[in-house]
Image: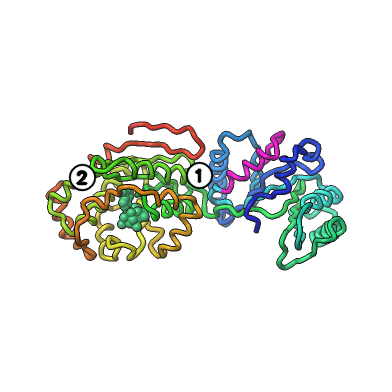
Amino acid sequence: MSASLDSTTVDARADGAVGTAAQELGELCVLLKLGEIVLKGSNRHLFERRLQNNIRAAAKGLPEFRLSQRKGIIMLRMPGASDLEVAQLAERMRNVMGIVWVHLVRRVAKDVDTVTQVAVQAMADRSGSFAVRARRRDKRFPMISSELAGHVGAAIKRAYPHLTVNLSQPDHTVQIEVDKDEVFVFTDGIPGQGGLPVGMSGRGLVLLSGGIDSPVAAYRMMRRGLRLDFLHFSGMPFTGPESIYKAYSLVRQLDRFQNGSRLYVVPFGKAQQQLRNSGAERLQIVAQRRLMLKTAEALADRLNASALVTGDALGQVSSQTLANITALDDAVDLPILRPLIGMDKTEIMDQARAIGTLTISELPDEDCCTMLTPRQVETAAKIADLRQIEKRLDVEELAEHLASNVQLHRPSFLGEEENTAA
Ligand code: ATP
Ligand code: MG
């Protein structure tokens, strides 16, 4: 319920009270609760391994930690690290797909008095109501869960008489989990991203404009386990490089969720002009989009990506009518995933805000699509007409040419940026 990490434990460090206090309170660790991954039956260990690798990649640059996997949870311990460093590790875990909850927990000995003392500490400086929830993974512990919860609850009440007990809708929940060798005590956690670990569903290539929609589409597919590469078409040499800067910042932002992202940029202006010169007229926009998709398909082949991703939403703009979407699907053999197809613009904007891409998308740029836009846009493009235009141009060869002249960038959220020509 709380949107931030447990402030009590983190503040303890800010006060400089780490050393002895940490020992008294128990070691601060990160407890991750997993979601769907636990449902995956016999494949579970493959998913677990993928998630563990992603966790390690997301923790790059932080002190070393030990990871232990148990059913439905992962424990991260950083012995010797400061509370602040442990909190930073927890913060990174918020972006790792496949994790449902992130908790900063105190790891304490399996002793009722110690557990009680740590639980009382955890509730210092709180107001309102609370509940204690206990569960035992180890049934040999001397108290059953309800007894333990009652015992700890009574101690908290004695220590802070102003707190009230509310078992159905508490302001704060103290959780006690009795494991095989230790007990974890913690209060409210922060929600993770949920979904599936990135990479588990394979690889995709997302067509990333500078707009609001495609970054959200990328996020949603990463959350379903796709590892993504990004492809941006700029209007260069007829526009400035602004849209490339935007694409770069967007990928950097999205890189939080997968690490190691690659952005491919295609200067598309001349190809757009060729389409116009071959008489595309009202079909200019759809013809451009088909050429983008064909180029993406050629690049996907090199990158081993088995799907394309776009930010299309049904009926949002004229190129996204059902007839035009059908004409787009006709351009390539690869499946085109459109996770936003049934979403309203306001819903998409809310999600863009939540993942931190909205303010970047709203920066001004010269979108390549607004260049050479015909006065009237065809809303019911005929595939035969499009193919006719493409034949005049030898569009397949053009797509191959564009795909082999991409520029590669590596926008990284965690640093170590490098630009290389592909
Ligand atoms: P967006 O907000 O993502 O720009 P949009 O609502 O502006 O989407 P369109 O301009 O029709 O809609 O584009 C639909 C989709 O086509 C985009 O979501 C994106 O996947 C792809 N696309 C459009 N322009 C580009 C571009 N310049 N580079 C890469 N992909 C593009
Ligand atoms: Mg756009």
Residue furthest front as drawn: 364
Q: What stretch of residues is rendered in magenta?
A: 77-94
What's under tag 2, amino acid-wise? Ala
Q: What mark, if any, has residue 256 been given in the picture? A: 1
Q: Nearer the viewer, residue 331 or 341?
A: 341
Residue underneath mark 2? 271
Point out the image quarter for the N terminus. bottom right
Point out the image quarter for the C terminus. top left
Residue 151 lies, in percent from the top left, at 85, 58
Q: In terms of sequence position, does the residue under pointer 1 or pointer 2 come before the other?
A: 1
Vertically, is 223 above or below 377? Answer: above
- The answer to whether mark 1 and mark 2 are in CB contact below 8 A is no
Residue at the spot x=41%, y=65% of the render?
344
Vertically, is 351 above or below 270? Answer: below
Vertically, is 62 above or below 336? Answer: above
Residue 84 is covered by the magenta coloring: yes
Whether the residue under disc 1 has CB within 8 Å of ligand 1: no
Image-based side of 385 in relation to 85, left or right: left
Image-based side of 280 in relation to 347, left or right: left
Quarter of the figure with residue 405: top left
Residue at the spot x=75%, y=50% of the render?
185
Q: Secondary structure at mark 1?
A: helix
Q: Nearer the viewer, residue 107 or 166?
A: 166
Residue furthest bottom as drawn: 168
What's under tag 1, amino acid-wise? Arg
